[in-house]
Amino acid sequence: MTVDAIVVGARCAGAATAMLLARGGARVVLVDKGAYGTDMLSTHALMRGGVLQLQRWGVLPEVVASGTPAIHSTTFCYAESDTTVLIEPKYGVPALYAPRRTLLDRLLVDAAFKSGVDIRYGVRVDDVKVDSRGRVTGISTVEGGRRCDLEADIVIGADGLHSTVARQVGAPRIAQGRHATGVLYGYWEGLSADEYRWWFKPGVSMGSIPTNDGATCVFVSVPSARFRDEVRGNAAAAYTRLIQQISSSFAERLRDSVRVEPVRGFAGHRGFIRRGSGPGWALVGDAGYFKDPSTAHGITDAFRDAELLARAILRGTTAAFAEYEATRLDLSRILFEVTDEIASLAWTDAEVQSLHRAFSTEMSRELRALAALPPAEPAATWTRLAS
């Protein structure tokens, strides 16, 4: 079977990319080894750029209609003081949102399906096909115990942190982080539902993020090198102890709340930026760009790059891909470097506040770049990609 584009990974980055390509006139197959509507590790938090993208794609109304609470302020709790930032309407975005991934990924997959994408779950990709010129021409898959080859003009890896596509094409890393945090997180009912709240203390941090069904995701982070020693085989006990260490007043609030899911953990992974495209292939989401979850900006990055990549593919020229690479790196580099410094958890109160101001400045620059994109124009026919 031959199509215009194959997207590997049906999470938020892959589903969004597939949807945008199909709306632009491409024949797209979207494959995923998992199942429709399943959950995954996530901070859930969307920054303004991510909300802007959902609005542009027509998906935000469904996010809101599904009961995702509107976030109207963000509070940063430092060792010496607290700072609250109000979320004022800007670029048509009235509030922030943090949908559960069981909702967000499903809505994007549904939008991709309505746009004409052929979606296949339970498909494991075990090889990338390459021609004699070194150009990727398709994938080899296993589906229901049966092997199948799919060919396409371009194969897009949206298959996460340990991407098979990135490994098979040998996508080089162009930036490498030095720090990582290990995370414990759980979901609670009975907490305030209208603000993001972040705590930053030397050696440890915490976040409180309201999401769907009256639940709030509460996570704690420590340096990855300390994570296993902190957990010591009892994630729930370590989680409770760290929350108490960070904020005894918030720990007291949790005693009047109900934890509705088990405590889960992520031992951490150092961030990286990989080259985002090559002959017949491209990467999007965590497959091409992963940074520590300390700044809760991953989904917003994924949506940004889905938009930029889809536009480059639909233009189909060497210059378009070069522009994608340059823009993606320009909008990512400082966000990546500042996040890596924050993930060290080795700063003074004044230093981490300065890092947050630098991060905010870069988010504003990214938002302006996204807001300035012209409306996408559907292509009448698929244009063969430049080799």
Image: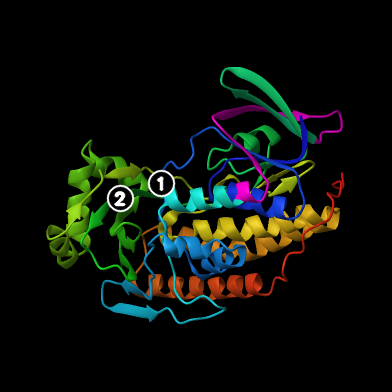
Which structural element holds mark 2? strand
Q: Amino acid at mark 2?
A: Tyr
Q: Position of residue 351 (x, y in %)?
A: 40, 72
User: Decide: marks 2, 1 in contact (CB < 8 A)?
Assistant: yes
Could you tell me how far apart the alpha carbons at marks 2 and 1 are, in whole angstroms?
A: 9 Å
Report the residue at 75% width, 43% height from top: 27
Classify 326 as above or below 162: below
In the depicted view, which residue is nearer to us: 23 or 203? 23
Decide whether residue 257 is among the magenta residues: no
Quadrant housing the C terminus: top right
Q: How is the image coloured?
A: rainbow
In the depicted view, which residue is nearer to us: 287 or 91? 91
| Left or right relative to 214: residue 105 | right
Decide whether residue 124 is among the magenta residues: yes
Report the residue at 64% width, 26% height from top: 141
Q: Which residues are magenta?
A: 112-135
| Left or right relative to 76: residue 317 | right
Q: Position of residue 206 (x, y in %)?
A: 30, 60
Q: Badge 2 local density, few (<14 within 10 Å), some, or many (20+)?
A: many
| Left or right relative to 243: residue 256 | left
Q: Position of residue 284 (x, y in %)?
A: 62, 49
Q: Is residue 274 visible?
A: no
Q: Badge 1 local density, few (<14 within 10 Å), some, or many (20+)?
A: few
On residue 185, which mark appears?
A: 2
Q: Amino acid at mark 1?
A: Leu
Report the residue at 73% width, 71% height from top: 374
- Write down the residue under mark 1: 41
Q: Position of residue 95 (x, y in %)?
A: 44, 74
